[in-house]
């Protein structure tokens, strides 16, 4: 069994409150969970308005398939138009 973990850092320009940020992040996380069947949560920068740290995880036996799923998540975030992907890191445990 392998665990694939994705950590992302997003910039949210134009966000002026934590309430606005949480609305954007909540919707994005929900769409990603449903579309890619991964565990997802806000894991860093919870008190910053214009920065978000999101974490994703999935479990399986086929490492290339797990990495492909996480690459699809990265591409989805990058093309979502709701946030700017500043940095990301994928790790297989």
Image (spheres, helix red, strand yellow):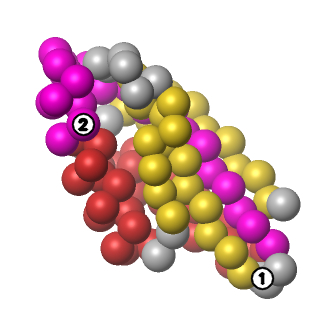
* Residue bearing the label numbered 2: 22
Distance of label 1 from label 2 (alpha carbons): 33 Å
Q: Is residue 68 visible?
A: no
Q: Is residue 89 above or below residue 51?
A: below
In the rendered structure, does residue 21 fall within the stretch colored magenta? yes
* Residue bearing the label numbered 1: 62
Q: Tell whether 35 sits left or right of 56.
A: left
Q: Quadrant of the rendered structure where residue 88 is?
A: top right
Q: Secondary structure at mark 2?
A: helix
Q: Secondary structure at mark 1?
A: loop
Q: Tell whether 70 sits left or right of 85.
A: right
Q: Is residue 8 above or below residue 15?
A: below
Marks 2 and 1: in contact by CB < 8 Å?
no
Q: Quadrant of the rendered structure where residue 31 is?
A: bottom left
At horizontal 31% and vertical 36% (from top left) the residue drawn is 83
Numbered range of the magenta stretch? 2-23
Please tell me the numbered disc located at residue 77. none
* Viewer-closest of 4 and 80: 4
Q: Tell whether 52 sits left or right of 70.
A: left
Q: Position of residue 28 (x, y in %)?
A: 29, 52
Q: Earlier in the sequence, mark 1 or mark 2?
A: 2
Quadrant including the C terminus: bottom right
């Amino acid at each position: 069994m392998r665990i694939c973990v994705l950590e992302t850092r997003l910039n949210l320009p134009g966000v002026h409150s934590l309430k606005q940020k949480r609305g954007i992040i909540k919707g994005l996380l929900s769409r990603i969970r449903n579309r890619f069947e991964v565990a997802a949560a806000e894991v860093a920068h919870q008190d910053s308005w214009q920065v978000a740290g999101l974490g994703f995880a999935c479990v399986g036996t086929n490492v290339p398939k797990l990495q492909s799923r996480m690459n699809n998540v990265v591409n989805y975030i990058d093309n979502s138009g709701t946030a700017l992907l500043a940095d990301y890191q994928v790790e297989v445990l």
